[in-house]
Image (cartoon, helix red, strand yellow):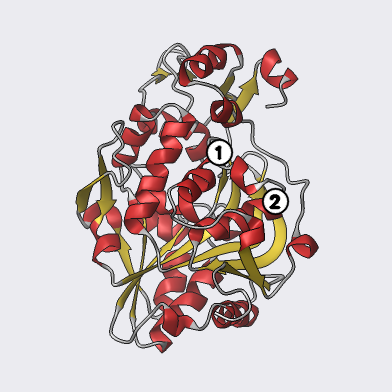
Amino acid sequence: MPAGEGKSRVSLVECSDYDLPSVDTAIQQSFDNLGGLARFVKPGQTVLIKPNALLGASPEHAVTTHPAIISAVIKAVIKAGAAALVGDSPGNAYANAEKTMSETGIKAAAEAAGGKMVYFQTEGVARLKSPSGGTKLPLIPIARPVLDADAVINLAKLKTHGLTLYTGAIKNMFGSVPGFNKTLFHLNCQNPRDFAAAIVDVYELTKPELNIIDAVVGMEGRGPSGGAPRRLGVIIASADGVAADAVGSYLMGYEPLEIGTTALAYRRGLGEARLEKIEVVGGSLEAVRQADWRRPRNLSRLAQYLPPALFRFLAGLVSIRPVIDQSKCTRCRVCLKNCPAKTIHYDKERNKVEIDHSNCIYCFCCHELCPYKAIALKKSRLAKLLGL
């Protein structure tokens, strides 16, 4: 590495829209900034491309990785002489994965570019020992296509997140955990610190060769699915997913170590989170940064500074609870089916879906997966006073 030798390198390339030629050029420039795609992909390899396909939302909602990004990466991988597989696991364990991939535009884009779709729910799971020695989840379930690939390219989407504050490269690899296995993470890791530790376990076990974050249009506010699209106009890329997330979160107004997954992955030695130790090429952080992105309502900041017992006590007083807006609810029951704590119920006589907050573990899966944005996060008075 030249002048920045010893530093993690992050590419920052301007890309103002999703016009295919513009995206192709920006992705190629991203590879060039990192020393070329040949550093990461070899002829004859099978490359697993892992987008964010959280739910079946069309691209303009900025919930998922844009199909144009996926298309550009597939074409580059094939040009490098490798086979390109595209796969993810939707957040809704009951969802038809093929239908989700079609609704997002990912399936059509992947197949048109010469890639092959794989669906994690049907391809088998390996249970691997927690690399951190975690006792909450001693065995981590990972979809076999991710482990069987010669190389993994992680195609994340830049978004806020109601539980983890921010989602980018590290959090995107949680999609390697297919179907109902995700429930185990929320049930066993109810404290945000424990959840972050389990997410970092997944990232460490699946560690991608290359991380690309679609930050052309990201999401602010009630992310990762109920927020508003916001244009940042860049593509972020790095071999170091921790450094990519440090840059991504900084560009939307966070300090990198505010993000639990970033801080923990850095402490484990999985990558660099200190901006002064990161070599940014292709663009300027300060020229791109938009520090006024609306943030999600979140208790995680308290968890970073308090002992677990005190956090649990305060969480009962400083509540941020999911509430169903009955005027928007269609009774599709996605929230009910995917609730890890089974605390959401359908009252047939009243034709209402309701949440029993006495058993709620505040994982916000219902808020994340509701396709109609019918679940709001209501703050207690103390939570408002604390600015959560």
Nearer-the-camera pick, 134 or 277: 277
Residue visible at 65% across and 15% down in the picture: 380
Callout 1: helix, strand or loop?
loop
Q: Is residue 204 left or right of residue 138?
A: right
Distance Cα–Cα, label 2 vs label 1: 26 Å
Residue 254 seen by the camera = yes
SS type, badge 2: loop
**Front position in the image: 52 or 302:** 302
Q: Position of residue 171 (x, y in %)?
A: 47, 49
Task: Look at mark 1 in the image and give the residue it sits on.
Answer: 372
Looking at numbered disc 1 in the image, what kind of residue is underneath it? Tyr
Which one is closest to the eye, mark 2 or mark 1?
2
Amino acid at the residue labelled 2: Met
- The disc, 2 or 1, on the residue closer to the chain's N-terminal end is 2
Quarter assignment of residue 78: bottom left
Q: Is residue 21 above or below residue 376?
A: below
Please state which of residues 114 and 32 is positioned toward the viewer in this rendering: 32
Query: How packed is label 2: few (under 14 Cα within 10 Å), some, or many (20 or more)?
Result: many
> Could you tell whether 110 is left or right of 134 in the image?
right
Kindly identify which residue carries mark 2.
252
Q: Quadrant of residue 122?
A: bottom left
Rendered view: 300 above or below 49:
above
- Image point (29%, 35%), residue name: 137
Tell me, for residue 346, which label it has, or none.
none
Quadrant (top left/top right/bottom left/bottom right) for the C terminus: top right
